[in-house]
Image: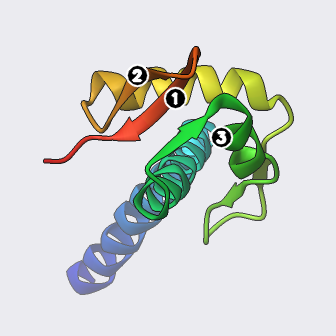
Amino acid sequence: MFSFIYKVLIIAVTIAFLGSWGIIKQQRKEQELIDKLYNKASKKIIKALKSNDSLSDKQIEVILKNIKASLFWSKSQIKVTNVNTLKKELLKKMIDKDMISTRINKGKVVYCLNKN
């Protein structure tokens, strides 16, 4: 009798845990998608900066144009629709993290990879 009650309690606790974990993951999905998009975009910019000495705003816009991000456990996707907004926020974050720096080249602002 006690064995049966114990098993039912274990199953109930497991179901409650998995249900609450799913709800929390669902609530955080949007932020995880945005973070994944920023990470993917910054990796693309760093890769381009490794092959080129510097990148202009226009070159960065071309790189960021059709980036998509998705989570493996969800069908939801996020895609860049406004390249300028993403570019400004991403470059600001990358400069704050000291990943890239700016310099003036022929009167235009260009972005360079920091040598760490």
What type is the residue that disc 1 sits on? Val
- Identify which residue is drawn at 52% across, 50% down: 45
- First in sequence: mark 1 or mark 3? 3
x then y, percent, for residue 4:
32, 83
What type is the residue that disc 3 sits on? Ile
Q: Is residue 53 left or right of residue 97?
A: right
**Residue 24 visible:** no
Q: Is residue 41 above or below residue 87?
A: below
Mark-to-mark CA distance, 2 and 3: 15 Å
Q: Is residue 1 left or right of residue 104?
A: left
**Residue 25 visible:** yes
What type is the residue that disc 2 sits on? Arg
Secondary structure state at the residue bearing disc 2: strand
Residue receiving disc 1: 110
Mark-to-mark CA distance, 1 and 3: 10 Å
Residue receiving disc 2: 103
Between marks 1 and 3 in the image, the one whose residue lies nearer the viewer: 1
Secondary structure state at the residue bearing disc 3: helix
The front one of 104 and 33 is: 104
Residue receiving disc 3: 60
Q: Pointers 2 and 3 in contact (CB under 8 A)? A: no
Q: Pointers 2 and 1 in contact (CB under 8 A)? A: yes
Q: Is residue 47 above or below residue 108?
A: below
Q: Quadrant of residue 22?
A: bottom right
x then y, percent, for residue 8:
38, 74
The front one of 74 and 14 is: 74
Mark-to-mark CA distance, 2 and 1: 6 Å
The front one of 110 and 13 is: 110
